[in-house]
Amino acid sequence: VKIYKVMSCFSQMEELQKENVYIKDAERVEKLLCQLIQDGKSKLQIITDFDMTLSRFSINGKRCATCHNVLENSSLVPESKKQVLDELRDTYYPIEINAKMTIEEKIPFMMEWYTKGTGVLVECGLKQSDLSLAVKESNALMRDGCDWQFSTLHEHKVPMLIFSAGIGDILEEIIKQHSQMYANMRVVSNYMDFNHDGMLVGFKGDLVHTYNKNEGALRNSDYFTTLKDRRNIILMGDSMGDLRMADGVPNMQHILKIGFLNDNIEERLEKYKEAYDIVLVSDSTMDVPNAILKKIL
Ligand code: C5P
Ligand code: MG
């Protein structure tokens, strides 16, 4: 009975039948889903990106803020610095989403973008006490269904790693304002370093950018070691760099990769279909991951 229930779940899941859902290898996904359902929640862990994966890409045709944009667009940053940051984005974001360049070709440019960008932010005299208001005044939003997902994963004690090339302090504040930070969540990101007056003086630790998450994953392998019995992973991301977030997981058995394709869609769809098991095009919700979680939990 269990096998029957499991084998038919794919076709029963109406969320997977929608037009914006692309699955290159349906047989593999069917098998993976079966396995994840059979193994259940005690074997599961979630590894997810933040910007444009947990957070929303756009609303009513307008881009939503990334962690970095929350600061760049706020009144905390003087106009002259805004201009510099805008120019950086106009130069480097097209490289980030370029469909023809390889990850290795993109890495030096991402390093440049992040180094210059964080340098400019430090020059702005930002204060820790201003961050909450900057988030409130921004249009950073979570995808519909994140709140349900977070509380449900917490309730079922499924660990969630949020691995972000954004800004840790900002992403935590976005989550707090739109949902809640729970004890089962762990964040690996770029955290701000404040002096005793609460003034931003730099960033802590090694820089995480969009395409070096593999290195970060290996640096955080202690985290994965404590979860060594959780051999099944659901990975969510919106960038080709996010596929490397699980590189530090020992004894991984099954990994289901769900990719949100938000921008430069036609050019990148084929690559995303190759790399991610399930590709969700221009989807502002967590409907598909949540439907899968409902089957597993
Ligand atoms: O991969 P992840 O979503 O964690 O990367 C952070 C996001 O922040 C990327 O989507 C990137 O476009 C964005 N970003 C930005 N401004 C910067 C640096 C990164 O909006 N200065
Ligand atoms: Mg992202």
Image: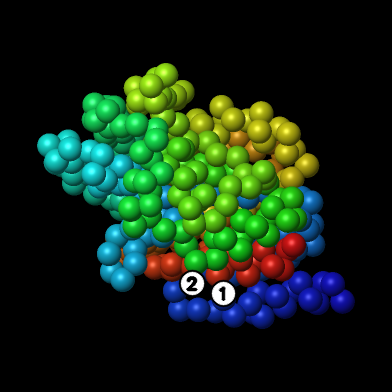
SS of the residue under disc 2: strand
Q: Which residue is mark 1?
A: 16
Residue positioned 45% across, 78% down in the render: 19
Residue positioned 71% across, 68% down in the render: 295
Instruction: Work out whether residue 277 can be spotted.
Output: no
Tell which residue pokes out farthest to the top in this image: 196
Q: Is residue 121 left or right of residue 164?
A: left
Q: How is the image coloured?
A: rainbow
Kind of residue at badge 1: Leu
Neighbor class of circle 2 (other Cα within 10 Å; few <14, some 14-19, many 20+) is some
Residue 21 got which mark? 2
SS of the residue under disc 1: helix
Q: Is residue 5 left or right of residue 14?
A: right
Residue positioned 66% across, 28% down in the render: 222
* First-in-chain label (1 vs 2): 1
Residue 188 got which mark? none
- Which is nearer the eye, 193 or 239? 193
Tell me where residue 104 appears, x and y as whole percent. 36, 36
Tell me where residue 136 appears, x and y as whole percent. 38, 52
Cα–Cα gap, marks 1 and 2: 6 Å
Residue positioned 46% across, 23% down in the render: 205
* The quadrant where residue 196 appears: top left
